[in-house]
Image (cartoon, helix red, strand yellow):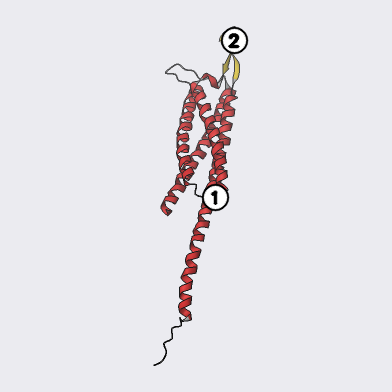
Amino acid sequence: MAPIDTTTPLHATVDMEIPVKWSAQKPEYKASKGVDGVKNHGVVDAALRAVVFVCGLAAVIVMVTSKQSKMIPISPVMSIPLDANWNQSPAYIYYVVAFSVACLYNIITCVLSVLTLKKTGDSTKLQFHLAILDSLLLGIVSSALGAELALAYIGLKGNPHSFWKEICNAYGSFCHHLSASTTMAIVSIIALLLLVWHSYYTLSKKIVRG
């Protein structure tokens, strides 16, 4: 009787080794892709927070330096000095306080985003909490801008039904400050809106992959 050959064929050995090599390389590809995703999100997040901070700070500075004094005639022979200042209206005070809080919040969270760039771990929890806080802040600054715009419109156009006269024809510098501050505030809110959208979009992609 002929002896049985128990030697494993060469092609069988090769076929068994190839799947093992491919399966060992696959997790490395996923890990590198996840790290790149975290870094990309961190760069966009930090950039948008910097825009929110800079524009919000500019809006606050322009508003608090808007004081204007002018001699207002009260009779044909008499005039008195009257001031137009942001702290004379609760709406403007709310506006300044809201954007001051937004600036402080975004400088802190911007630092956190920069620190996240140096980490390779999962920051999903941090992104989730920041997205909720960003949404809350967006509502606060939007309401502050709405209150400021309503009062600024009255100052520009007046309200004949309530016998409120416009003041921008007398306090031109004050109204120019309001206009510039409003423009910077709108840019800040748009950047914050994009930040909220980007955060939820990134989180939704992680949920789908998970």
Q: Residue furthest bottom?
A: 1
Q: Which residue is mark 1?
A: 39
Callout 1 touching callout 2 (CB < 8 Å):
no
From the viewer's perspective, tell me whether residue 195 is left or right of residue 54. left
Residue 191 on image: x %, y %: 52, 39
Placement of 88 over or under 134, stated as above or below: above
The first of marks 1 and 2 along the sequence is 1
Taking the spot 52% from the left edge, 50% from the top edge, the residue there is 121
Whether residue 168 is visible here, answered yes or no, is no
The disc label shown at residue 79, or none: 2
Instruction: Give the mark toward the camera: 1 or 2.
Output: 1
Specify the amino acid type for callout 1. Lys
- The residue nearer to you, when weighing 201 against 186, is 201
Residue 45 on image: x %, y %: 53, 44
Taking the spot 49% from the left edge, 60% from the top edge, the residue there is 27
Mark 2 lies on a secondary structure that is strand
Residue 81 on image: x %, y %: 60, 12
